[in-house]
Image (cartoon, helix red, strand yellow):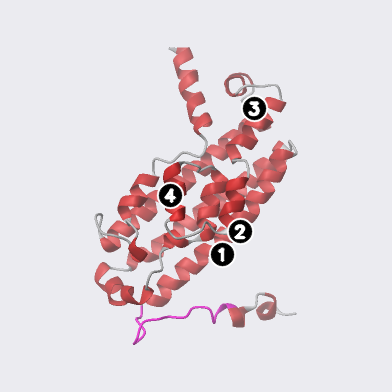
Amino acid sequence: MDYGSYLALTELLALQRTQSQPEHPDELLFIVVHQASELWFKVLLHEMDQLEDAMRADDAERAVTSAGRINVLMRIVSQQLAALDTLPPQRFMQFRGYLGSSSGSQSEQFRAIEARSGLRDEHFLSVLREHGPIPPLVQDSLARPTMQALYLAMVERAGLTLEALYLEHEHSTLFRLAEGLLEYEQQFGQWRFLHVQLVERIIGPRTGGTGGTLGAKYLSNTLKSRFFPALWDVRAAIYRAAT
């Protein structure tokens, strides 16, 4: 076993198959950024397994560690989008037609992450159905309790309320976990915002996306989504009580 065989580099580096004829010099970058995102999505789903297991076991310390890693991974996913900021619209249009009906909205792993994180509203479900039957990976995620539900169950088993946790136990591990989960939502929101900006930079704010999607218009609407509404609401409750 050596470095190349352990990482299956021969197979891995053969997976970037450009479609443009003649090959467009920017298409490789486009493919690699999206393939790399899918690899990080795979790791994110794995780490979400660890986080959920820890919360079910009331292991707040382990859950805090898992949440911290997830937040680092989200920063990586966001930062690599900057590579596509170097792709001007006229150059993207030179190979866009070769993408066919493919669209980032068809990413099963990304949809699974959204579902695991807490999206359950009808708009989200209707978007899933637009591309046919909901994939098994996403169905499995929808069948699981949301991360907020798992966290609130931990708080309840500890005999606390969120208000008491924030006002009387701010040095506890459960409090640090709450803040870690909220940071995850912020990191995810920043990824969404950067994605919207990227799409608008390449194809404009009122243009449909690849694969017949609504493009930036749809992505902008997703900025309003909340994974942990209870963790946002407790802030309003504390503020009201203090005024």
The answer to whether residue 195 of the structure is visible from this angle is yes
Where does label 2 land, which residue?
43
Residue type, label 2: Val
The first of marks 3 and 4 along the sequence is 4
Residue 172 in view of the camera? no
- Disc 1 marks which amino acid? Leu
Point out residue 32 in the picture as x, y percentages from the top left corner: 47, 71
Instruction: Give the CA distance from mark 3 to mark 4.
Output: 41 Å
Tell me if label 2 and label 4 are in contact, CB under 8 Å.
Answer: no
Rendered residue at 59%/34% (across/down): 178
23 within the magenta span: yes
Question: Circle 1 sits in a helix, a strand or a loop, which is it?
Answer: helix
Say what secondary structure mark 4 lies in: helix
Of discs 4 and 1, which sits in the foreground? Answer: 4
User: Earlier along the polypeptide chain: callout 4 or callout 1?
Assistant: 1
- Given contact means CB atoms under 8 Å apart, are the residues at marks 1 and 2 in contact? yes
Residue 171 — which label? Answer: 3
Q: Residue furthest bottom?
A: 22
Q: Earlier in the sequence, mark 2 or mark 4?
A: 2
Residue 54 shown left or right of residue 29 in the figure? right
Question: Spatial distance from mark 2 to mark 4, Cα to Cα?
Answer: 27 Å
Range shown magenta: 12-25
The image shows residue 95 at horizontal and vertical percentages of: 32, 76
> Which residue position holds label 1?
39
Work out how far the residue at label 3 is from the one at label 1, CA to CA, in angstroms: 35 Å
Q: Which residue is mark 4?
A: 126
Q: Earlier in the sequence, mark 3 or mark 2?
A: 2
How far apart marks 4 and 1 lie (CA) works out to 26 Å
Q: Which amino acid lies under the numbered mark 4 shown in the image of this protein?
A: Ser
